[in-house]
Image: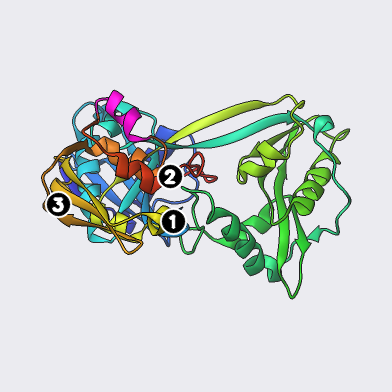
Amino acid sequence: MLIRELTVDDVEDADRLRRVAFGSIGGPSLRPGRRGLAAELDGRLAGVLTIKDFHQFYGGSTVPMGGLGLAVAPHARGRGLAGALLDASLRDLRERGQALSALYATVPALYRSRGWERAGVHEWLDLPLARVPAGARIDARPAVAGDLSALHACYADLASTVDGMLDRSPPAVDVADVLALDVVSVVPGHDGDVRGYLAAERGVDRLRVFDLVGRDVTTQLGLLSELGSWSGVLDRAAVRVTDPAVTGLLTDQAVEFTVTTSAWLLRVVDLPAAVAARGWPAARWLRPAAVDLDVVDEHAPWHAGRRRVVVEDGRVRVEPGGSGAVRLHARALGPWFSGMQDSHALRRAGLLDGDAALLDRLVGAPGVPRLADFF
């Protein structure tokens, strides 16, 4: 077995391998904002791991994150290629300053064995268009290329308040891709701003809504009204949950809907770097304090061992040392960092031992971490 960097000469074979594994690949294995690792077996490409250059919002700040996709040829499965690629990816991610890694797991046990754990949700709602609540009519128009910057700013304002969301920065994400959708309606604001937008694609039997984002309740209800105007043409809509307020607080509670949830897994690759990049809004209200950790992480030894999480002057840092009073498994780091699980749940899962109340106070309870993008 040989693990090496994926090259342009590998792309055709890598794309074919990924297509067999996933059914579709959503773009070539190498492109701006995406790199990869290759696994050779008997001199032939037998596995590929792609890494997308993303940034996730946590506490209002962005943390560099590598979004992983892993595929192994059917004949080569069970021979250790996947584990070897994941081990190599951890070193690669750290060297490139990506303190986190996230993925959608087809084989959760494999990723959990390397320290990834469930840390948030990706949700779609399927609902009847005739039951969508209607707001007052708003002045919306089709989006044009000149709206892209303001449209992205509108999305980013929302995403910065929802832990786990991507900032959709280039080159991994091309904001111009939205214009290829069938429906992109924008609600103009002042001086070129966008108050909200609706991005959707017409399917055979339903409207697929990728984003419904509004800066205020009037805009949100107005966009919901536009969505409801499709009733009679189509019976149902599938709405990706970008803003939980739109689909939770504003939707008529009598409407019937089906929720489809995909879990994404998070891995803290470099604990000191991740903590330094994250926003910690609760820290400003805390007195100087520290919690002593003993991090168990055989696959990322650079941050394993005794570490202190220190809160001081409204800031949070990780430094070496301490008593190791709280024993913390690598799998506990992701769900703690995202806010998906508190120390009590992690203790019951056997991933934490000791009094880690300070960790809970730092993260607070900002809502369910979520991604609105699938990769």
Q: CA distance from mark 2 to mark 3?
A: 27 Å
Mark 2 to mark 1 CA distance (whole Å): 9 Å
Helix, strand or loop at label 2? It is loop
Compared with 230, 9 (above or below) is: below
Q: Which residue is mark 3?
A: 302
Separation of marks 1 and 3 at Cα, in angstroms: 27 Å
Labels 1 & 3 near each other (Cβ < 8 A)? no
- In terms of depth relative to the viewer, which is nearer, 321 or 14? 321
Q: How many residues crowd around disc 2 within 10 Å: few (fewer than 14), some, or many (20 or more)?
A: some
Quarter location, residue 22: top left
Q: Residue 194 location, x and y as percent? A: 71, 64
Image quadrant occupied by the N terminus: top left
Q: Are marks 2 and 3 in contact (CB under 8 Å)?
A: no
- The answer to whether mark 2 and mark 1 are in CB contact below 8 A is yes
- The residue where tag 2 is placed is 364
Q: Which residues are magenta?
A: 342-350
| First reached walking from the N terminus: tag 2 or tag 1 | 1
Residue occupied by mark 1: 281
Residue 56 located within the stretch drawn in magenta: no
| Res 82 quadrant in image | top left
Residue drawn at point x = 22 percent, y = 26 percent: 78
Task: Confirm whether the magenta stretch covers residue 343.
Answer: yes
Asked whether 368 or 197 is in front, the reply is: 368
Camera-side residue of 72 and 263: 263
Residue 254 image offset from top left, x and y in percent: 77, 25
Tell me how the rendering is colored. Answer: rainbow
Tell me which residue sits at (15%, 39%) in the image.
325
Q: Amino acid at mark 3?
A: Trp
Query: How far across and how far down the image is residue 114, in percent?
Result: 23, 36
Q: Could you tell me which secondary element the residue under label 3 belongs to? A: helix
